[in-house]
């Protein structure tokens, strides 16, 4: 067989018509059958593309200009969209974003899960797909004139794109970041420099309660001391008199991890509060709490519908976090058992149960795949198991434990369609039938999609 040579060369400019989108939202165009992946290209568009990387079976291109535009192309409202790596889909109409996400879920169901028969519903989108995030954590840098700047990183780099506003953030978060940046600049507080591992202020984090309006500011520094602490606190309170909590977090490590292990409340309360539906939550600087509570309510309502609780059931919630799903389920079940590996989250879950006067739920610290077989040995037979794992999906041992427990129904909440499809295949082979998948768009303008899936015992 003669060796196939790609039909394009690096730095060559070619004209392509985009046929499809990748899971990341890049346009797919072909030259003599050879795929080129091109950011910001949309299906149906004819465009001039510069080839930037050539591999054996595919290449990457840069969009130079669009000769024939798609009706789905829109002007991104964010002025730094094309530099910033935070959002990927602002150039695409919202209806097209939802179509792309549905196609992504259907593709992995077929290709990875071999579940062609499973219905994937239209994604539930947002009426207003902007300003939905209740938490911002943004790196701090310095301009040449010594002023501080804040912004997300440029794609595939650690260059901070100086930005005044982020259109998917709650406006309070934006205003708060701007205020802290201005105050810290006036007080002469230095930004952290990750190259030299010197300087002070690494990140600013702001959390807001969407329902309550509570505000928490977290200042993350390399140094144990927070310079000009008193002045900083007073000026933040002057700028935002409603601020409920100011927290200092120390991260001395040379790392991409944002929060360090030392946290001190320097003003106000350790927690702020928010509600999803009629359940209240305490949120600390370290708490994992859903960033889009509006869509989380939609997601959990669907999970509750799939759990089909009538009041007499026992539910196990693996990966229970701070108890968000557990508490929703407890309102309708006889008993809920939550398990979570992060100790702080388990403490928060117990506090949240007390806060809501919910006493038919128990939380345990440990790996679900180790705790669940022990529960089974104690005679626990759940009617429903709920899982909401991280992006890497469920541990194989956990899937085995779920199958051994033989619940009537499994509700699988997922933030990664690929690992969801892989895990559903294992559950299907273990005796469960996947009834349907409901995508919920928690993250408009980005390529992420959440799904909630309903399985029943065959």
Image (tube, rainbow, N blue to C red):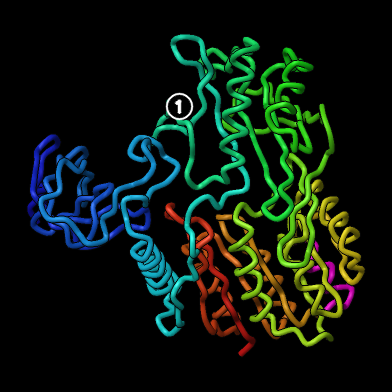
Magenta stretch prevailing secondary structure = helix
Which residue has dot 1 on it?
160
Whether residue 3 is visible here, answered yes or no, is no
In depth, the one of 298 and 372 nearer the eye is 298
Q: Could you tell me which quadrant the C terminus lies in?
A: bottom right
Q: Residue furthest bottom?
A: 458
Q: Could you tell me which quadrant the N terminus lies in?
A: bottom left
- The magenta-colored residue range is 369-380
**Residue count near mark 1 (Cα–Cα under 10 Å), binned few <14, some 14–19, many ≥20:** many
Residue at figure coordinates x 58%, y 21% from the top left: 182
Q: Is residue 301 left or right of residue 171?
A: right
Percent of width and height locating residue 167: 47, 44
In depth, the one of 184 and 351 nearer the eye is 184
In depth, the one of 367 and 332 nearer the eye is 332
Percent of width and height locating residue 428: 55, 80
Percent of width and height locating residue 31: 10, 54
Q: Is residue 412 left or right of residue 154?
A: right
């Amino acid at each position: 067989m003669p060796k196939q040579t790609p039909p394009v060369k690096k730095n060559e400019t070619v004209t392509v018509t985009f046929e499809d989108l990748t899971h990341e939202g890049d346009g797919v165009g072909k030259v003599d059958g050879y795929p080129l992946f091109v950011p910001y290209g949309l299906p149906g568009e004819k465009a001039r593309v510069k080839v930037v990387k050539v591999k054996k079976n595919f290449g990457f291109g840069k969009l130079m200009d669009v000769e024939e535009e798609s009706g789905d192309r829109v002007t991104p409202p964010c002025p730094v969209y094309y530099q910033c790596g935070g959002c990927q889909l602002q150039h695409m109409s919202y209806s097209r974003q939802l179509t792309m996400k549905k196609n992504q879920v259907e593709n992995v169901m077929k290709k990875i899960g071999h579940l062609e028969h499973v219905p994937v519903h239209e994604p539930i989108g947002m009426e207003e797909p902007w300003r939905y995030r209740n938490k911002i954590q943004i790196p701090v840098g310095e301009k040449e004139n010594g002023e501080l700047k804040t912004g997300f990183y440029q794609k595939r780099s650690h260059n901070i794109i100086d930005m005044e506003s982020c259109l998917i953030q709650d406006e309070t978060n934006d205003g708060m970041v701007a205020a802290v940046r201005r105050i810290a600049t006036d007080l002469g507080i230095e930004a952290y420099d990750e190259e030299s591992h010197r300087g002070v202020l690494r990140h600013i984090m702001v959390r807001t309660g969407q329902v309550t309006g509570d505000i928490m500011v977290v200042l993350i520094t390399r140094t144990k001391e927070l310079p000009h602490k008193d002045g900083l606190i007073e000026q933040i309170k002057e700028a935002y008199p409603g601020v409920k909590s100011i927290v200092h977090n120390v991260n001395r490590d040379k790392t991409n991890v944002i929060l360090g292990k030392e946290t001190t409340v320097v003003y106000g309360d350790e927690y702020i509060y928010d509600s999803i539906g009629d359940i209240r939550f305490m949120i600390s600087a370290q708490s994992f709490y859903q960033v889009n509570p509006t869509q989380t309510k939609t997601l959990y309502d669907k999970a509750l519908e799939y759990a089909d609780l009538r009041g007499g059931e026992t539910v196990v919630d693996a990966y229970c976090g701070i108890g968000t799903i557990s508490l929703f389920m407890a309102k309708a079940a006889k008993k809920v058992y939550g398990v979570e590996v992060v100790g702080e989250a388990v403490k928060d879950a117990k506090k949240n149960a007390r806060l809501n006067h919910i006493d038919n739920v128990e939380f345990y610290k440990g790996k679900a795949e180790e705790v669940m077989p022990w529960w089974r040995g104690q005679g626990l037979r759940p009617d429903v198991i709920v899982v909401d794992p991280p992006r890497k999906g469920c541990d194989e041992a956990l899937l085995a434990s779920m199958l051994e427990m033989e619940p009537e129904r499994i509700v699988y909440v997922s933030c990664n369609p690929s690992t969801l499809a892989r895990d559903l295949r294992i559950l299907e082979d273990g005796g469960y039938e996947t009834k349907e998948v409901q995508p919920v768009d928690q993250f408009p303008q980005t390529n992420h999609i959440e799904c909630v899936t309903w399985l029943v015992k065959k």
